[in-house]
Amino acid sequence: MLKVVIAGVSGRMGHALLDGVFSDNGLQLHAALDRAESAMIGRDAGEQFGKVSGVKITADIHAALVGADVLVDFTRPEASMQYLQACQQANVKLVIGTTGFSEAEKASIEAASKNIGIVFAPNMSVGVTLLINLVEQAARVLNEGYDIEVVEMHHRHKVDAPSGTALRLGEAAAKGIDKALKDCAVYAREGVTGEREAGTIGFATLRGGDVVGDHTVVLAGVGERVELTHKASSRATFAQGALRAAKFLADKPKGLFDMRDVLGFEK
Ligand code: NAD
C-alpha cells in the first residue's frame, strides 16, 4: 500500500484528497500536514468525514515524512518550498499541485527532481491535460494571423492570477507558434490602449462565487474564431489526478514529470 502524506489537509483541495485516499484501497493515509496556525492541528484527519482515521493533523514536516512514500502538496508556494527541502532530505517523492510559483521557485523544483521523483502540474485533471495538447495543436495550425486570448474564471478565494493553468495553456499556445511565452505574453490588458500587437498572447482573469475552474483559449482570426473550453465542476477531478500521479511515482526514483507523463499522453 502506498503511504501518502497530504499537505494542506484543512484546505479545499486537502478535503478532496482525504476523501480520495479514504476511498482507495491502494492508498494509506500516512500523515496529514497543515500550517502551525491551523485550527485543525491535533484533530483527527478523518473528523471532517465523521470518522476516526488514527492520523492526527500536524505541522511537524520531518516527523510526518518518516516512513512515507509520497507527499501530495496543495498549499502555497512558501510552504511547498519547505516540503521540497524536507522531501529531498527524507527521500520522499512529491506531487506538487500548488500554483503561483516564481521562476526561481520553479528552478528549485527542477533542481530537486535530480534527487527525487516529482510530478508538478498546475492542473491535475484529465480534461485540462487534453486541452493543453489541443491548444498546442490548434496554435500550430492557426499560426498566421490569429490572436490568442486565454480567459479563466475561479472562485473569489483564489490568490494567484492568472491561474497556473492559464499560464500553462499560454505556454502550450506559444509552443504551437514556436515561441517562448515570455516573448509573446501580454499579462494585463487592463488599462492598455491602442491596437493589439501581432503575435501576442493575452490573459484575462475573472474571479467570483464558487467557480471551481473555467478556462477558454480563443484563437481569433479574420472572419472566424476557434474557442477551446474546459470547465471543472468538482475538485474531485484534481484530487483523483493527484492521487494517480502519486501512484505513477512509485517506480520513479527521480525526475520531473507532468500530467501528460502520468496519463501517457503524447508530448
Ligand atoms: P485553500 O486555501 O483552501 O487551502 C490551502 C491549504 O494550505 C490550507 O489547509 C492552509 O492551511 C494550507 N497552507 C497555507 N499556507 C501554508 C503554509 N505556509 N504552510 C503550510 N500549510 C499552509 O486552497 P485550495 O483551494 O485547496 O488550493 C491550494 C493550492 O492548490 C492553490 O495554489 C491552488 O491554486 C492549487 N490548486 C491546484 C489544482 C491542480 O489541479 N494542480 C487544483 C486546485 C487548486
Image (cartoon, grey):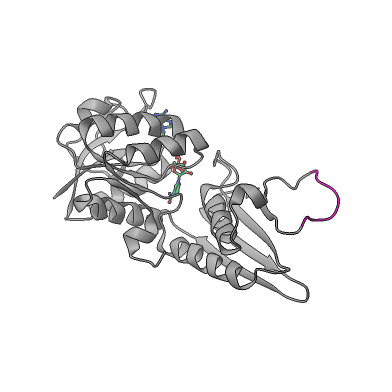
Q: Is residue 207 visible?
A: no
Q: Residue at x 52, y 69 (%)?
A: 134
Residue 111 in the image, given as x and y percentages of width and height = 36, 37
Total numbered labels: 0
Ligand 1, seen in the image, is in the quarter at top left
Residue 196: in magenta span:
yes
Query: Range of the magenta residues?
Result: 191-197
Q: Quadrant of residue 68?
A: top left
The C terminus appears in which quarter of the rendering? bottom left
Please tell me whether the stretch drawn in magenta is mainly helix, strand or loop: loop
Instruction: Tell me if 208 is positioned left or right of 27 in this view.
Output: right
Q: Residue at x 67, y 61 (%)?
A: 148
Q: Quadrant of residue 197?
A: bottom right
In the displayed structure, would residue 94 be above or below residue 61? Answer: below
Residue 169 in the image, given as x and y percentages of width and height = 55, 57
In the displayed structure, would residue 63 be above or below residue 1? Answer: above
Q: Quadrant of residue 196?
A: bottom right
Q: Residue at x 35, y 56 (%)?
A: 241
- Of residues 57 and 62, which is closer to you in this image? 62
Q: Is residue 250 visible?
A: yes
Instruction: Tell me if 210 is positioned left or right of 109 in this view.
Output: right
Residue 233 in the image, given as x and y percentages of width and height = 48, 59
Residue 246 in the image, given as x and y percentages of width and height = 27, 50
Residue 64: in magenta span:
no
Q: Residue furthest front?
A: 178
In the displayed structure, would residue 248 be above or below residue 87? Answer: below
In the displayed structure, would residue 213 be above or below residue 225? Answer: above
Q: Residue at x 55, y 59 (%)?
A: 175
Instruction: Tell me if 123 is positioned left or right of 225 in this view.
Output: left
